[in-house]
Image: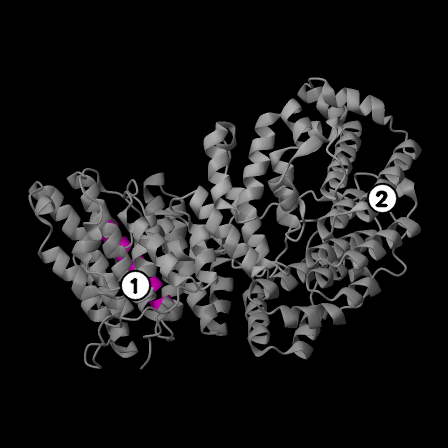
Amino acid sequence: MAAALAVHCFASLGQAQSPAAVTPSERTTLARAIELVDAHLDKAQREMNADLKRRMQVEAYLALLSLPSTHRQYEAADRLRAIDEALAEKSPSASSDREVIEVGLAAARTLAEERDDLQRIFLFDRQYSGLSSGEGVNKQYFLQLMRANDADAMSWFFQSMQPGVGEVAGLVNRSVAIDWLCQRGHRSLARQVATRLTAPELDAAMGLRLADLGASAEAEQRVAGSMTQTTRRAPAGPEILARLAVMASRRGDSAEVERLVRKVVEAVEPRQLSPDRRVSVDYGDCDWTLDRGFARRWQARSVYWQSAFKLTAQPGRTALGQPYLVALAEAVAGATAGPASVELIEQLIAIFDKSARENGIDLTNAAILAAEAQTDIARRNNAPALAWHGARQSLILARVAAGAPIDDAAAKALGVDWALSFLANYPRSPLARRLAGLAGPDRETLDRINPKLRAQLQLIALVLEGNAVDARALMEAEPAAVDLDAGPVLHIIEARQNAGLTDRAAAALDAYLHVFPGKDLPALRLLLLQGRRDRAKAMLRGFVAGSAGAFGVSDIFVGVMLLREMGDRTDLATLVGLRQGIDAQEASRRLVEVADALAWDGAASEIEAATRSLPKDLAQLPAKDVACLRDTLQGLQAVALARRGELEAGVRLVEGRSLDQRQFCWVGKGYDSKPIFDVRFLVQEWVRRGHAVP
């Protein structure tokens, strides 16, 4: 059952303002909530249906473990574990109960962490994960120190970390913890702690984090004594310097980039600058300040989304990075363009060629191998030579990005993916301006070798330069340009926003939305970040007017939910009716999605009114479908009541439901979701909104 406490992405769901104040007599107290859960448990004891009885017990025990009270907590923990262990020996038909336990425990643990309930966290660790060393308590102590912004205590905490399996002197633990601080917006604290972790074995990990945090001098101090190969591990110094060059390029500091480049090539023998020595050029947690998890958090506010999907954070993939010399060359080109930059990159190419010779690599033969069709076996056997060829191609492209002419070799190496990646990694690069006005020999070369590529690159560049008129004209004149995935273009605009280039990001975003109109969550988030609320509201209304998802949550929920947060109180009937000419099945799904968004806002009375008086086309559905729809709406009303503090009223609405009725019910499909309309979920939502007070 260790999986039960896996880290689920139950992000803090925040507080929603209820449309009407709740009177003290309507708000459920903590004492009354305990009585309600006890009563639910008593009903479970009298239930004759074994499956329903077990489910009611599971719900009650999870509810007790979610409350900020010690009432029957050990009994609940023991009984819940006994039920789960018994279910583990049964057939797969019992898996839904185990899933309720898994999801419910994850939510209960999150609630305990949010209120710093160390006793409950330790109970979860010991009872369900088999942990005896207090890992959960350690994590909670870390979060307490983070919230207190206590650099002294946090530094001691980092120094006391013990290495885990496969770690070297705790490198992984400390690196991950620094990333956690950055993810939670505590970059200043992360910088102070990383600066104080001066053990030589931590130089590589902390040096890279300090580079991302803008502590250039402190990061460079970690380089001394680690520039040359002394052990089997690659030396830390060149990697730190290369990362510092990447960060300086993103700031537009070309002089600093040149200094760092020369420091690397003067200190490191060419033989050691092979392509297998790499540095990350991606954005990490400490140098990317925009919220990466916004879409998931918006979706997690949906009751249906929580009932249909496990909100787990997917493990991040570690990027391979770029060879040192490639990263340095791109950093030069990313900071500025001109003859001096081209000359410096040509020096790096010469060093690369020398390194290839010293490592026994024939670059001409590598190019021949790369041009041939490769079987999987041949590709594996030729991987070293192909890596050298690929690195040299990247150096040629960096030379072009710095202002060199686009010759045949560069045109053949050039691709949309490379351009998109380079422009995102180096948002101050002048390459977009050059591609937008592509003319003369450069354009002739690209048109001769790959005219579709030229059209696509020019379209990307025109959008990034904010030239919507010429971008649309290009799309109409050259259809090849339209065959383009626009998503990565938006990432470049996000990179500009992240770099503080707000005006350029806004101009590019306007052009992007003109050229690629439609529903776009990342574009919406950028509009909100830029304070352009009217434009954001217009896009959100487009979300709501779109089609409903296929038995799921889509743009309609997000649109209504965010419009409500922005003060738009458009009534439910109008929201549902924004899309005309649809069948009853889609109309019912639209109604459910809108009601789901109202439930986030605690608008129980509006959902109740819709349940009593369904739209005419839905009221005329067969009785079975009407009952199905009203089951779901009433469940959402119960959640809305709990979220606004009226837990008891919400519980009354879900009492007596069958196992099926604990799910969403969809017109034309029936009951289909994970269990959600039950005491467990209502109590957890009630606690999450801060209502669990005496």
Residue 49 seen anywhere in this rendered image of the structure: no
Residue 663 percent across, percent down from the top left:
25, 49
Nearer to us: label 1 or label 2 = 2
Q: Name the residue at 23% across, 56% down.
A: 595
Measured along the vertical axis of the image, is residue 203 above or below residue 438? below
Q: Which mark is residue 343?
A: 2
* Dominant secondary-structure state across the stretch colored magenta: helix
The residue indicated by pointer 1 is 564
Q: Nearer the viewer, residue 540 or 4?
A: 540
Residue 667 lies in the magenta-colored region:
no
Residue 297 percent across, percent down from the top left:
42, 57
Measured along the vertical axis of the image, is residue 540 above or below residue 369? below
User: What's under tag 2, amino acid-wise?
Assistant: Glu
Count all numbered tags in the image, as a single digit. Answer: 2
Q: Name the residue at 70% across, 63% down.
A: 162
Q: Please state, as top left, top right, bottom left or bottom right, where the C terminus lies in the image.
A: bottom left
Q: Name the residue at 78% across, 48% down.
A: 328
User: What's under tag 1, amino acid-wise?
Assistant: Arg
Q: Give the quadrant of residue 649.
A: bottom left
Residue 190 percent across, percent down from the top left:
66, 68
Stretch of the chain drawn in magenta: 50-65
- Image position of 104 (left or right of 119): left
Residue 56 lies in the magenta-colored region:
yes
Disc nearer the start of the sequence (1/2): 2
Q: Name the residue at 53% across, 49% down.
A: 466
Q: What SS does tag 2 mark?
A: helix
Q: What SS does tag 1 mark?
A: helix
